Amino acid sequence: MEVQGRIKVIGETQTFGSNGFRKRELVVTTEEQYPQHIMVEFVQDKTDLLNNYQVGQQVKVNINLRGREWTNPQGEVKYFNSIQGWRIEALQSETAPADMPPVPPTAAFEPATDLNTEDHDDLPF
């Protein structure tokens, strides 16, 4: 699965517990009719993937959905979901690459001059 959008927030790397578990959060805002702010977690060695990205940059993030079950001290079962990122790549801007030459204006099509109006045309319009 993947999420595409513009980076809104890149969090600092957080370290938890004595085992050194690391987590870093990224918020990507989708660009659609109703934009969504999707928080994606990068864990352990994947936290370093965010070092080369900046707020405002357009990206595609490959994700996995994770879910887990937890029983609280009162015996109630709770369920939690998370979105984990495992790859991120910058999206190219939608402008033409700089090495592409512009289309010359003389490349426009000229109207046909050799039409025979007596030829049968079966097109409905």
Image (cartoon, rainbow, N blue to C red):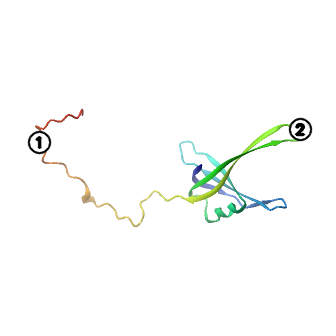
* Numbered mark located on residue 10 in the image: none
Residue at (70% x, 63% y) in the render? 45
Please tell me which residue is depicted at 58% across the width and 45% down the height of the picture: 35
Gap between marks 1 and 2 measured at Cα: 88 Å
Whole-percent x, y for residue 47 in the image? 69, 61
Q: Work out which residue is located at the far top of the displayed protein and give it.
A: 124
* Residue located farthest toward the right when viewing the structure as drawn: 73
**CB under 8 Å between callouts 1 and 2?**
no
**Picture coordinates of residue 12, whole percent (x, y):** 72, 61
110 relative to 31 in the view: left or right = left
Q: Earlier in the sequence, mark 1 or mark 2?
A: 2
Picture residue at 59% right of the left edge, 49% below the top: 1
Dot 1: few (<14), some (14–19), or many (≥20) neighbours within 10 Å?
Answer: few
Q: Is 91 positioned to the left or the right of 55 in the image? A: left
Helix, strand or loop status at disc 1: loop
The quarter holding residue 124 reads top left
| Residue that carries the numbered disc 2 in the rendered image | 74
Give the residue type that dot 2 points to.
Answer: Gln
Looking at the rendered structure, which numbered label has been put on residue 116?
A: 1
Badge 1 amino acid? Asn
Q: Is residue 60 above or below residue 35?
A: below
Q: Position of residue 88 (x, y in %)?
A: 60, 58
